Image (spheres, rainbow, N blue to C red):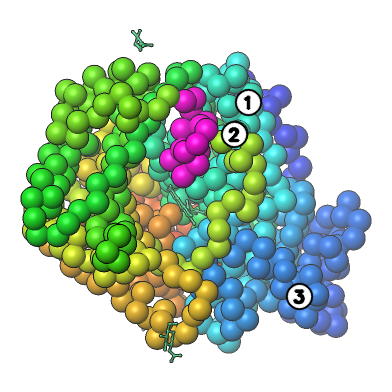
């Protein structure tokens, strides 16, 4: 018996629509055009929608360009040449989401779901190749963004268009600061995509990923049906908690368990600007070597990450800036004690530490370090839109001084470059790797995030220069990082790893990138895909391909019969 079946009053009444699933042929014959036919389809399946034209936007409509652009976070994919959807759907209710999916299916459109539009490769709203293959619809669920907190039961229910900032704010307000939620630091990322792909942040060592804390969900499946956890079964419920968005259905609500946070937490940021080739650099190499040995094994309450970026000094020369950033779930005296025990070399003093509450610490980690009010988190456009490319690696053993030295060399080559190193360990390594699709658990000590950003003055050679830098760092890291497979993280989507070919999405080919994201779990994800969306209504260049495996099924055990087989 799941403890959360007691939560019935918290959940919305389920509205089940059984679309009559007209065949594409039938619809196009009756229709003057795709848009008109689609509007009729919506009216039929969602009779309460007063004006379906507010839901359905075609490229020629004045409403389409601004709505499409609204959450394109990576400006690389905002140009008019970027292949976009044949129809953009903006449902305001769950019934409209169901109708949107069923009508896309009926019209032969594949579906891409969009919540916050922060996908690093833009796959929630764009195709990588100009159309010619299967056209697609984007179902943008940003308008579904209610968050309800039940502090007494320590749960919250959030719709997909809620941002992390809105969720954090609601949790802190709703619990008087007693509860928090472990997820990422960018407040404009939406829970729709974030929890679908895992979601890590500064309290992951204590509480794991955001997806590790999901206890129920509602999904609109490829047929337009609304399913809660018990209706979808444990295989689909497993797949949606880390298998990446855009493959299994559209999540229309998450129910998450909230975690206790102390009323006072502490943070510090220590910056060291290096001079190359002198004792500064030697000392930093020693410090980073020690840090690598301890950071993944610290008490769970303590998170100490490292970031590197270039900084122009007074003489106009670019030098490596190394930043240690830490969060401790306790007061500053506890923080100093722990740092003194585990990393005395960093020499943290009381004046380095700041006490605050949990929500302020999330703001602090995002960069608002001056005690700004929590309301800052309610700004849905807080994160600036930029041109960028990001790649991510995992480390299973510390990197030697030669590798660190190489990073110092590379970081000063690119003004828009930065490298973040986040320690895992703690709760992250206690969870067995097959419990959720996120497989990088025990033994995965750190993740390395390589960022490059550039300004709006963009031409192809300019872009290639920046892309070349970030790909070059990734290449140079090869000897130091996880291999067989070289692991990656689906929420840090990277099309350099490989992509599906339209019309021929094969499991065998997708394994090349799929195993990097999910290791042995990729196979189970592909088997779930075959169960719930064999026709690939939900398709993108990195959606999970279906894998049909002949196996014995016992009646009534449809879901229990699917066993992990690595
Ligand atoms: C500035 C910035 C900072 C970030 N920081 C972190 C971090 O600290 N930790 C971390 O783990 N990640 C981080 N990320 C990555 C982020 O978690 C992922 O990009 C996430 O998938 C974005 O979710 P979204 O809804 O905003 O994006 P979208 O682009 O809308 O969606 C991302 C993917 O999920 C699918 N999807 C969207 N909505 C749904 C839905 N309702 N149901 C099913 N599938 C859906 C999309 O089709 C797409 O495949 C960051 C990203 C950015 C841009
Ligand atoms: C989940 O869905 C099933 C089937 O539609 C329904 O019987 C059940 O009451 C729902 N559970 C909750 C907790 O809402
Ligand atoms: C800090 O926290 C510890 C442990 O909770 C407590 O014993 C101590 O009194 C606190 N110190 C201060 C200065 O608040
Ligand atoms: C591209 O942009 C860069 C930086 O603005 C500039 O130096 C370069 O000359 C441009 N190249 C072309 C071909 O326009
Ligand atoms: C589709 O993929 C399979 C498996 O890789 C391959 O054998 C086949 O040739 C591909 N077909 C086309 C048309 O590309």
When asked about the image quadrant of residue 460, the answer is bottom left
Q: Residue at x 47, y 84 (%)?
A: 459
Residue 111 - label: none
Distance in Å between CA atoms under marks 2 and 1? 10 Å
What is the C-alpha distance between the residues marked 2 and 3? 38 Å
Q: Is residue 459 above or below residue 238?
A: below
Q: Is residue 43 visible?
A: yes
Frontmost of labels 2 and 1 is: 2
In front: mark 2 or mark 3? 2
Q: Camera-side residue: 389 or 349?
A: 349
Name which of mark 2 and mark 3 comes first in the sequence: 3
Compare residues 36 and 406 and report the one nearer the observer: 406
At mark 2, the secondary structure is helix
Mark 1 CB near ligand 1 (8 Å cut): no
**According to the image, label 2 marks what residue?**
374
Q: Which residue is mark 3?
A: 58
Q: Residue at x 72, y 51 (%)?
A: 143
From the viewer's perspective, is 128 left or right of 54? left
Residue 424 image point, x, y percent: 28, 40
Measuring from the top left, give residue 59's x and y in whole percent: 73, 78
The residue positioned 71% from the left and 73% from the top of the image is 65
Nearer-the-camera pick, 228 or 191: 191
Residue 200 in magenta? no
Badge 2 vs badge 1, beta-carbon distance below 8 Å: yes
Name the residue rendered at 17%, 23% in the picture. Answer: 341
| Residue highlighted by disc 1 | 173
Sequence-wise first label, 3 or 1: 3
Whether residue 26 appears in this view of the structure is no
Q: Along the polypeptide, which appears first: circle 2 or circle 1?
A: 1
Magenta-colored span: 356-371
Left or right: where does residue 494 sit relative to residue 179?
left
């Amino acid at each position: 018996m799941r403890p959360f079946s007691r939560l019935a009053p918290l959940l919305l009444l389920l509205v089940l629509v059984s679309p009559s699933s007209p065949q594409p042929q039938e619809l196009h014959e009756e229709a003057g055009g795709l848009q008109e036919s689609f509007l009729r389809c919506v009216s039929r399946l969602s009779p309460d929608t007063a004006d379906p034209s507010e839901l359905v936007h075609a490229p020629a409509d004045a409403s389409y360009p601004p709505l499409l652009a609204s959450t394109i976070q990576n400006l690389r994919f905002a140009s008019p040449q970027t292949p976009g959807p044949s129809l953009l759907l903006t449902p305001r209710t769950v019934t409209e989401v169901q109708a949107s999916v069923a009508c896309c299916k009926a019209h032969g459109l594949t579906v891409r779901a969009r919540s916050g539009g922060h996908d690093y490769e833009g796959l929630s709203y764009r195709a990588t190749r100009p159309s010619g293959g299967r056209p697609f619809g984007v179902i943008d669920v940003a308008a579904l963004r209610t968050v309800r907190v039940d502090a007494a039961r320590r749960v919250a229910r959030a719709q997909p268009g809620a941002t992390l900032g809105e969720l954090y704010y609601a949790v802190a307000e709703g619990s008087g600061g007693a509860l928090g939620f472990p997820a990422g630091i960018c407040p404009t990322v939406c829970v729709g995509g974030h929890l679908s792909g895992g979601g890590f942040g500064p309290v992951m060592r204590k509480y794991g990923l955001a997806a590790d804390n999901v206890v129920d969900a509602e999904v609109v499946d490829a047929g337009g049906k609304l399913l809660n956890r018990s209706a979808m079964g444990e295989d689909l419920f497993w797949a949606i908690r880390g298998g990446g968005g855009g493959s299994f259905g559209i999540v229309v609500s998450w129910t998450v368990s909230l975690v206790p946070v102390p009323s006072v937490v502490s943070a510090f940021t220590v910056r060291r600007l290096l001079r190359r080739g002198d004792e500064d650099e030697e000392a930093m190499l020693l410090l980073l070597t020690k840090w690598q040995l301890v950071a993944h094994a610290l008490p769970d309450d303590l998170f100490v990450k490292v970031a590197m970026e270039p900084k122009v000094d007074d003489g106009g020369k670019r030098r490596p800036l190394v930043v240690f950033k830490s969060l401790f779930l306790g007061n500053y005296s506890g923080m100093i004690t722990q740092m003194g025990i585990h990393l005395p070399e960093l020499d943290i003093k009381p004046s380095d530490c700041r006490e605050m509450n949990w929500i302020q610490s999330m703001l602090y980690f995002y960069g608002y370090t001056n005690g700004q009010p929590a309301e800052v988190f309610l700004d849905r456009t807080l994160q600036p839109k930029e041109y960028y490319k990001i790649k991510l690696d995992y480390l299973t053993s510390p990197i030697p001084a030669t590798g660190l030295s190489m990073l110092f060399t590379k970081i000063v080559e690119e003004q828009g470059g930065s490298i973040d190193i986040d320690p895992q360990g703690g709760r992250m390594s206690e969870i067995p790797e097959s419990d959720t699709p996120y497989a990088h658990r025990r033994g995965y000590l750190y993740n390395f995030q390589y960022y490059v950003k550039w300004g709006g003055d963009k031409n192809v050679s300019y872009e290639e220069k920046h892309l070349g830098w970030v790909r070059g760092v990734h290449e140079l890291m090869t000897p130091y990082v996880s291999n067989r497979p070289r692991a990656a993280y689906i929420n840090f989507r990277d099309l350099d790893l490989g992509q599906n070919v339209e019309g021929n999405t094969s499991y065998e080919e997708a394994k090349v990138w799929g195993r990097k994201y999910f290791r042995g779990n990729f196979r189970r994800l592909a088997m779930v895909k075959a169960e719930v969306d064999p026709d690939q209504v939900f398709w993108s260049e990195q959606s999970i391909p279906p894998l049909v495996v002949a196996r014995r099924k016992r009646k009534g055990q449809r879901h229990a019969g699917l066993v992990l087989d690595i």
